[in-house]
């Protein structure tokens, strides 16, 4: 009793001094009714960029590298000279082949005259058929020699052309591991030319997407139609920068990797400004529509160790913990509930972390 009186006197004294006493407060809860709706989910795939026309530049002939006409990282156009190789031997071979052609043509002319002469004489029964046939054969041999000499000239001319190496596509020059004066051969790589007008992002499609295709009944004959129906893709670089031009899926391998259970997918991106380079890594983001799903705010889901629960409001306004399974929407705000709830259920959204089992949440 003395303790009670003392407590009362202390309370009255504090109140008279203007001190506010702490008052019990009710927790604030917000609820929502679960409904099914449609939502777009962004799927992210790790990818690496490469030029659609990446070309390894190697010489077609052996010789001394006389001049390097480009530098690493330089943008070049198709047909632009990249390297020149010592062409003196190739030029000599062409000169010799042209001289042999002239000699073969002279032999052909002589053989032709001989054959035509014997033909006239045979008609006059001056020479035998043997002489005519022999001259005809000599003429045919001379014609074959001319054809062979022409082929040698063309071969020598091609080899001379190989001494000037030009860009087969427009793009960017990669690393150049050789120097002027080096002896090079078809075994040497001079550089890598990345045809970066159009870039390709290659990545693996997850097994869940493969299962979705199977459920949708996509057959091998319909794969092109399925690819054309896929949404546009966005490329996000490692630093979070979003590439401004959208890409399209152009290839989806028809064979599932036995080890990973995935398909290889290729998305092409236009590169008009040359901002994308081969070797860049990032993420390809594609949004797929999910229809008739239960979407709840992340604040409604309470994580307890390896479980996810939501508090369902019962008819008497008390809360009951319900185990649920969820899928992240990727938007940082919502989850998709795949099991545990039904359409029409009322759940706690704001304040769910403060709810205890059986607590009254509606007043």
Image: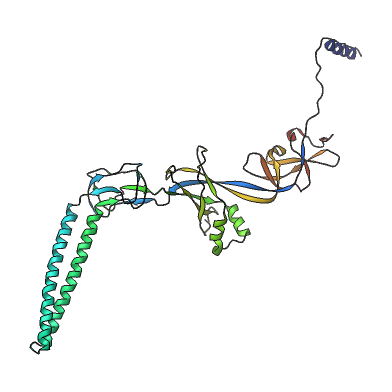
From the top left corner, tell me how far across and down residue 356 is, in percent: 78, 35
From the top left corner, tell me how far across and down residue 74 is, in percent: 34, 42
* Of 314 and 247, the residue lying toward us: 247
Q: Image height check: is 334 above or below 107?
A: above
Q: Residue at x 51, y 38 (%)?
A: 241
Q: How many marks?
A: 0
Is 272 positioned to the left or the right of 151 in the image?
right
Is 74 positioned to the left or the right of 250 in the image?
left
Is 338 positioned to the left or the right of 57 in the image?
right
Quadrant into which the C terminus falls: top right
**Which residue ends up furthest to the right in the rendered image?**
1
**Which residue ends up furthest to the bottom in the rendered image?**
125
* Of 125 and 63, the residue lying toward us: 125
Q: Image height check: is 341 above or below 354?
A: below
* Of 217 and 196, the residue lying toward us: 196
Is 243 positioned to the left or the right of 344 in the image?
left
From the top left corner, tell me how far across and down residue 8 is, in percent: 88, 13
Quadrant into which the N terminus falls: top right
Q: Residue at x 15, y 80 (%)?
A: 136
* Of 348 and 9, the residue lying toward us: 348
From the top left corner, tell me how far across and down residue 331 is, in percent: 63, 41
Q: How is this picture coloured? A: rainbow
């Amino acid at each position: 009793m003395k303790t009670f009186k003392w407590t009362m006197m202390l309370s009255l004294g504090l109140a008279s001094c203007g001190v506010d006493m702490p008052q019990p407060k009710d927790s604030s809860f917000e609820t929502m009714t679960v409904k099914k709706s449609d939502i777009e989910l962004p799927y992210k795939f790790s990818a690496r960029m490469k030029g659609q026309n990446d070309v390894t530049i190697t010489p077609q002939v052996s010789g001394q590298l006389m001049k390097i006409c480009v530098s690493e990282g330089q943008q070049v156009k198709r047909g632009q000279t990249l390297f020149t190789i010592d062409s003196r031997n190739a030029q000599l071979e062409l000169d010799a082949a042209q001289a042999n052609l002239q000699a073969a043509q002279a032999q052909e002319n002589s053989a032709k005259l001989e054959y035509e002469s014997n033909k006239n004489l045979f008609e006059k029964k001056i020479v035998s058929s043997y002489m005519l046939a022999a001259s005809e054969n000599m003429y045919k041999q001379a014609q074959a020699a001319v054809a062979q000499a022409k082929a040698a000239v063309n071969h020598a001319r091609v080899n001379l052309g190989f001494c000037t190496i030009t860009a087969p596509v427009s793009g960017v020059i990669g690393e150049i591991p050789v120097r002027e004066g080096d002896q090079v051969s078809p075994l040497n790589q001079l550089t890598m030319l990345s045809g970066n007008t159009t870039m390709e992002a290659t990545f693996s499609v997850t097994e869940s997407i493969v299962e979705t295709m199977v459920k949708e009944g996509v057959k091998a004959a319909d794969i092109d139609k399925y690819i054309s129906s896929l949404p546009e893709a966005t490329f996000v670089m490692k630093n979070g920068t979003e590439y401004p031009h959208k890409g399209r899926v152009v290839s989806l391998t028809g064979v599932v990797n036995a080890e990973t259970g995935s398909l290889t997918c290729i998305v092409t991106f236009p590169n008009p400004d040359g901002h994308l380079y081969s070797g860049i890594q990032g993420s390809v983001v594609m949004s797929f529509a999910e229809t008739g799903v239960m979407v709840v705010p992340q604040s409604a889901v309470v994580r307890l160790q390896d479980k996810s629960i939501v508090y369902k409001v019962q008819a008497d306004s008390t809360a009951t913990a319900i185990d649920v399974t969820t899928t992240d929407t990727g938007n940082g705000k919502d989850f998709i509930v795949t099991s545990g709830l039904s359409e029409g259920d009322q759940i706690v959204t704001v304040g769910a972390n403060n709810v205890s089992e059986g607590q009254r949440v509606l007043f």
